[in-house]
Amino acid sequence: MRYGPAPARSTVDLRNRIRRRWPGWHPSDCESLGRPILRRAPRETGVAVSGSRALDAAGVVALRRAVSALVDDRGVPASQIALARDGEVVLHETFGAASDTTRFAVFSVTKPFVSAVVWQLLDEGLLRLDTRPAELIPEFATHGKGEITLEQVLTHTAGFPNARLERAEAATEERRRQAFSRWRLDWAPGTRFEYHPLSAHWVLAELIRSVTGEEHCDSVEQRIRVPLGLSQRMLGLSRDDQKDIAPLTPVGPPSESDGAITLDDLLTVVDPEVCEVGIPGAGGVMTAGDVALFYQGLLHNRAGLWSPVMLQDATANVRNTFIDDYSGVPTNRTIGVCVAGSDGFAARRGFGSRTSPRTFGHGGAGGQVAWADPESGMSFCYLTSGLEQDFALLEERENVLSDLAAACVRV
């Protein structure tokens, strides 16, 4: 989830910013935007091992140092990282004012968890990609929305990116549907891409409820979290299950936002009543380990939650190549995740320069990072309670951390 544009900058600007932000590192071979190769000579030794496969010792040291520096030098209050491979977490560590069991607000990292339920419903024949939401939600048909398809909702081409569902409207099915009836199109569905920060996944949530009889939070719990063995409930938390959530803190000077989502909107995500609702596009609270294991589930599907055909479609079949006005490059979206791609723009999508073109994932506001690389078998998650407001720095950080995580793979 984004809440403002990234200013234009040159490669020289990036190099200078890296030197200022991360003293002791220097960029090398910075051939294109967002492709810094950072070096910092580690003196520590040892290999982080869990199970049968080890991580590269120097790579782990560099990753840990980078995350620690964000807490020590940038003022990030708390961060958590996890690497997983072969279906298990091989590195999990927390920095700053939090513990390894602390859950973090993950914002749009939530989206694939909800989409993953929809993929199951597609497998089961309860939904089709050409299903029109208005078929199941008649109130949605107003103001030209009647012909929108489920595929368009999943790929952010549905045309209502800025539609809002206020807190009171989210509480009941009746109020949600009344809100849908008031939503208007910003542009013709299927003609362009614009990121739908919250609106699209409210429609997905209502479709889930319509065909299963369950609220989306309970479907994520029973269909995703429990069968994948993830540690804690992550969406729609009761008041007595909210004691271990990291509080959110803005980091850096304020940046002007022209987006539908403001900083104040982001900060309310961990309010108790908002946590209870479980915003389907942004309201998840999770540990980095659970996110990394979710992506292992998508890589290996050992629980058999999706058919091979569906999983291939969901994680590899790019259906949306419209230009993203925010990044200036094709968005490369499937029906639930972004794909790094082989067009040279992986870094503009937050995947760095060392992951494979097949890498898929979805980030979140404030600097949350989550992806899986089918070629290395590694999944990575970085979570933070510090909402970075410097958008150029945010993009750099996503790519730096992704590169460092990819370098942890021992071949």
Image (cartoon, rainbow, N blue to C red):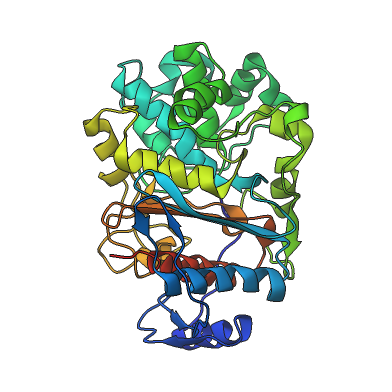
Residue 59 sits in quarter: bottom left
Residue 148 sits in quarter: top left
399 sits to left or right of 264: left
243 sits to left or right of 10: right
Query: Looking at the image, which residue is at 58% across and 59% down?
Result: 367
Query: Looking at the image, which residue is at 29% across and 69% down?
Result: 344
64 sits to left or right of 302: right
Of residues 41 and 168, the one nearer the viewer is 41
Disc tally is 0
Question: What percent of the width, then of the height, locates residue 99?
Answer: 69, 51
104 sits to left or right of 280: right
Residue 404 sits in quarter: bottom left
Of residues 197 and 228, the one nearer the viewer is 228
Of residues 18 and 374, the one nearer the viewer is 374
Q: Is residue 55 visible?
A: yes
Query: Looking at the image, which residue is at 29% across and 61% down?
Result: 356
